[in-house]
Every structure is written in structure tokens, then in C-alpha cells.
Image (cartoon, rainbow, N blue to C red):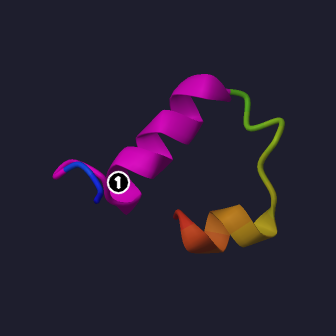
């Protein structure tokens, strides 16, 4: 079971908080989490 706040917005915010320079980003993630 997932927490109530678990969605793409929280995933995108978490990814951006851990990688603000977007070093580990790629085209797939840009499409999946715009």
C-alpha cells in the first residue's frame, strides 16, 4: 500500500530535490515526469 501523498508530483519533486542539476536525468524521465 502506498502513502496518500505518493504520486508523480511527489516523485518529480523528490527527484529534483536529490538531483537539482539534473545530472542523472534522461529523456525517458523528462517524458515520464515532465
Q: Examine the rendered structure and indicate whether residue 18 appears above or below residue 27.
A: above
Residue found at x 73% / y 28%: 21
Position of residue 19 in the picture relative to residue 13 (left or right): right
Q: Nearer the viewer, residue 29 or 5?
A: 5
Q: Examine the rendered structure and indicate whether residue 10 appears above or below residue 28.
A: above
Q: Position of residue 11 (x, y in %)?
A: 45, 49
Total labels drawn: 1
Which secondary structure dominates the residues rendered in magenta? helix
Say which residue label 1 marks: 9
Q: Which residues are magenta?
A: 4-20
Q: Position of residue 26 (x, y in %)?
A: 81, 58
Position of residue 16 in the picture relative to residue 24 (left or right): left
Q: Is residue 30 magenta?
A: no
Q: Nearer the viewer, residue 3 or 12?
A: 3
Q: Residues within 10 Å of mark 1 (few under 14, many from 20)?
A: few
Residue found at x 43% / y 40%: 13
Residue found at x 83% / y 35%: 23
Position of residue 6 in the picture relative to residue 34 (left or right): left
Q: Examine the rendered structure and indicate whether residue 12 appears above or below residue 1.
A: above
Q: Position of residue 3 (x, y in %)?
A: 23, 48
Q: Is residue 19 magenta?
A: yes
Q: Position of residue 14 (x, y in %)?
A: 48, 36
Residue found at x 16% / y 52%: 4
Residue at disc 1, secondary structure: helix
Question: Image quadrant of residue 2?
Answer: bottom left
Quadrant holding the N terminus: bottom left
Q: Residue pushed farthest front?
A: 1
Amino acid at each position: 500500500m502506498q502513502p496518500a501523498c505518493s504520486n508523480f508530483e511527489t516523485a518529480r519533486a523528490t527527484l529534483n530535490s536529490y538531483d537539482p542539476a539534473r545530472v542523472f536525468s534522461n529523456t525517458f524521465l523528462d517524458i515520464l515526469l515532465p
